[in-house]
Amino acid sequence: MEQALAASTAERRDDRTDQLEKLDARLRWLSSWIVHNANHRRENRDGLKVGGHQASCASMSTIMAVLYATAVRPQDKVAVKPHAGPLLHALHYMLGRQDRAQLEAFRGLGGAQSYPSRTKDRIPVDFSTGSVGLGVAITAFTSLVQDYLFAHGAIAEQDVGRMIALMGDAELDEGNIYECLIEAYKHDIRNCWWIVDYNRQSLDATTADRMFRRFDDIFETCGWRVVTLKHGKKQLSAFAEPGGEALRAWIDECPNAHFAALTYQGGAAWRERLAADFAKDGQALQLVGRRDDDELAALMTNLGGHCAETLAEAFAAAQDETPTFFIAYTIKGFGLPLAGHKDNHAGLMTETQIGALRASMGIAEGEEWEPYAGLGANAATALRDFLEGSPFAATPPEPEAPRVAVPALAVPRESEQSTQIAFGKILFDLAKSSEPLADRIVTTSPDVTVSTNLGPWVNQRGLFRRSELEDVFRAARIPSAQKWGGHAAGQHIELGIAEHNLFLILASLGLAAPHFGTRLFPIGTVYDPFIARGLDALNYGCYQDSRFLLVATPSGITLGPEGGAHQSINTPLIGMGQPGLTSFEPAFADELAAIMEWGFGHLQADDGGSVYLRLSSRKIAQVHRDDSGWREDALKGGYWLRPPSGTDAIVFMGALAPEAMAAWADLAAARERPSVGLLAITSPDILHREWTAAQAARAHGRAATSHIEDLLAPLGTRGRMVTVLDGSPSALSWLGGVLGQRVHALGVDRFGQTGDLPDLYRIHDLDTPAILAAARQLFR
């Protein structure tokens, strides 16, 4: 009975391996054909190379075939190596989830994207990739988000999934990988796999041999299990033959560049090299001699990452929650005539080469797009049943997360306050409330929680920790304003100082709704100038339509004594130029409360996005409002604080409200001209976006106007404006182009320095005398 059971098990294993190898071959073919068709068969109207990465796909086809067919479950999420995008499309094509037209239009308008994209591809994509390294790191942070939701009762234990990154080894050069590793270690992440396609070739070079074992050391030090898959079953079997240990040693010691070159040259080259190196080892020579050139080449290239059985066993053995780093040795371009060539990264097969590959797979001309071409009817049916029977094939569409009601936000009543202080008070009021919104807010900050005024929120809601973290200072009765205990119900995720990690965890938290069916409201705080340090990760989060609230404070030269390194200049332009992100710079607390209330709704809207608040630490006197008529216009980007009765206006934004208001008062008191207007800008981003959209509509014959056109209309076409903000003057100078009015733009156009505000505003021409001087010159 036991022998029969063992034989049955072996038969099933052999059948599974056979199906996996067939799937591997189909994926390799289809990914190659997708790229070939785009470059050689489709009309090329502009003469540019379409591109694609046939060799990079072939390098990972076995890994993806085995992973998706045996290891990926419906609750798991996968970030696919950017250059392996065609493989993902091929997989979904074989499952009937991708249509041929999309593949024929690969890298064309409306077709399959160059790299996996959540927002632009029609197939299910868990994580956008493309900016290498970021798609890897986000899986670790999504594991942390899953732990957060599990601890808060939003995910059942049986629904806890694994976050998987498929990466090229060149991505390991990206610094954000190691910033992420450190943070992941601090938070003791789990249920995460990183699988490296270790083909040892990048765009320009072959990986340095000295990196062998370094990656193992780094990951093991950070608490990861490292599984190295260097040899396939053929090689392991050969190593057991007489002379096999010598062959193993030779393979392990062969320099990467030599191995790649021999792979490209083929069996005869392998034989010549091995014959020379084994000249004094008769057993090793006999091992080589027992194989013809094709068999020898197949043996020498039978690395762990191209052996379906080896990969399946490795994935099956790592089913606990320990984070695992798989190093799968591969050959770039495996199975293609480009295999091993140092120029194969962007290389493309010729018509002759793709024809030879097609013939070797038994695919008839004209059947290149058939997903199971080259297989007999029975074999095709068996492979289709095998793939469709995989757990991954049962993955449902992403869930729709219910909307969360947004309450009216109370305005802090102090007569003098900064927007940074007001932000903290608004959030603290929410923390003390029983509003459902408050329970869904998750805050995070890169070691600036206190200095960005998040401390009161954390005091009320606590740090998130999977295991209890005692507040030692509080237990010792040492007075401190920060009473931070860590526990599973906490709602603040504490980060180290790396800004890339801030934006990656915001992206992860902001995808909780589609990933896990629970809507979160992530709020991340950071010093405004250091947005630039994480800008690639911010762009990455916006590109995949993650929803979060970025609160950047303090900002501008208004930091005063902090000095130039902490003073931001061009961040208003970043806010205006970043798709998927709506930026605001309020001056007053009531503006901020209205914007935050609008923002929580915008994070949930079908056509919404993320929100960026540029706040200040400068306390300023709050304005008295006679009514709420200003509010609607403020949310559209600007409103008249003092309407004009002539052609002139002072336009201001943010912390420079006192200087602008003082200049306006001086001009009004002097009665030098008809009443000058005072225009408060809350979002040049919204104003500019709506204006350009209106222009585009009119260019196509459609009637359209914009809020900024309506605002500036009272000044007439001969209108004149002095604009002022604590940032690049370009953020407001464009206002002159709306109706052809004249503008004198004041702002910061060089690095700041230490000093108090009177001195700094004076040397940058931002103080009241400078505004008056500009006004009197322009308005005369």
Image (spheres, rainbow, N blue to C red):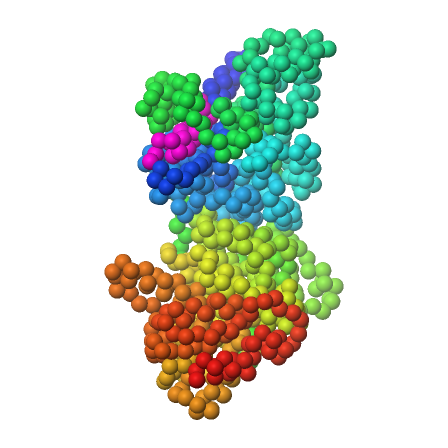
Q: Residue at x 42, y 18 (%)?
A: 360
Is residue 544 among what the camera can see? yes
**Looking at the image, which is closer to me, 167 or 152?**
167
**Looking at the image, which is closer to me, 357 or 517?**
357
Predominant SS of the magenta segment: helix
Left or right, residue 339 beside residue 94: right
Quadrant where the C terminus lies? bottom left
State whether residue 88 is above or below residue 415. above
State whether residue 253 is above or below residue 514. above
State whether residue 548 is above or below residue 673. above
Q: Which residues are magenta?
A: 22-43
Is residue 408 among what the camera can see? no
Name the spot of residue 107 as percent of width and height, x first: 40, 40
Name the spot of residue 760 as percent of width and height, x first: 62, 75
Q: Residue at x 63, y 78 (%)?
A: 759
Name the spot of residue 515 as percent of width and height, x first: 46, 47
Q: Residue at x 58, y 65 (%)?
A: 568
